[in-house]
Amino acid sequence: MPIAVDIDVMLARRKMSVGELADRVGITPANLAVLKNGRAKAVRFATLAALCEVLECQPGDLLRWEVEHTEGE
């Protein structure tokens, strides 16, 4: 998928665990893991806003677009 999720980077910068972030954002650790590992198909703006508030960052600090390479390139 061309959208990469950098929650791990922000967690490391904030010295915060996945469990603590999930508690503070109000989502389950399992759902946070799905998002963190890039397996989510969508993210609610309310969840993204809560992540940004807790991590004191901008949405672009958590999500970035990568060029998707096709086979043969």
Image (cartoon, rainbow, N blue to C red):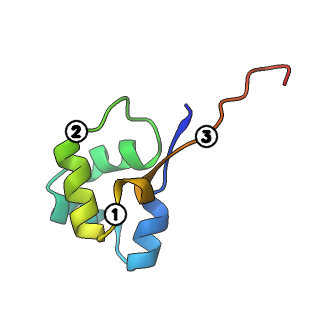
Q: Earlier in the sequence, mark 1 or mark 2?
A: 1
Q: Residue at x 35, y 70 (%)?
A: 17
Q: Residue at x 22, y 65 (%)?
A: 53
- The quadrant of the image that shows the C terminus is top right
Q: Earlier in the sequence, mark 1 or mark 3?
A: 1
Helix, strand or loop status at disc 1 = helix
Between the C-alphas of marks 3 and 2, the distance is: 21 Å
Helix, strand or loop status at disc 3 = loop
Q: Amino acid at mark 2?
A: Arg
The quadrant where residue 25 appears: bottom left
Q: Is residue 50 left or right of residue 60?
A: left
Q: Which mark is residue 18?
A: 1
Q: Amino acid at mark 1?
A: Val
Q: Which mark is residue 58?
A: none
The correct choice, above or below, for 73 with respect to 14 in the image is above
Between the C-alphas of marks 1 and 3, the distance is: 24 Å
Residue bearing mark 2: 44
Residue 1 position, x and y percent, is 55, 31
Residue situated furthest right in the rendering: 72
Task: Tell us which disc is closer to us: 1 or 2.
Answer: 2
Q: Which mark is residue 66?
A: 3
Q: Amino acid at mark 3?
A: Glu
Instruction: Tell me the crowding category of disc 3: few under 14, some 14 to 19, or many 20 or more residues within 10 angstroms, Cα based.
Output: few
Residue situated furthest bottom in the rendering: 15
Front residue of 26/52: it is 52
Between the C-alphas of marks 1 and 2, the distance is: 18 Å
Q: Residue at x 38, y 78 (%)?
A: 14
Residue 37 position, x and y percent, is 47, 46
Residue 36 position, x and y percent, is 42, 50
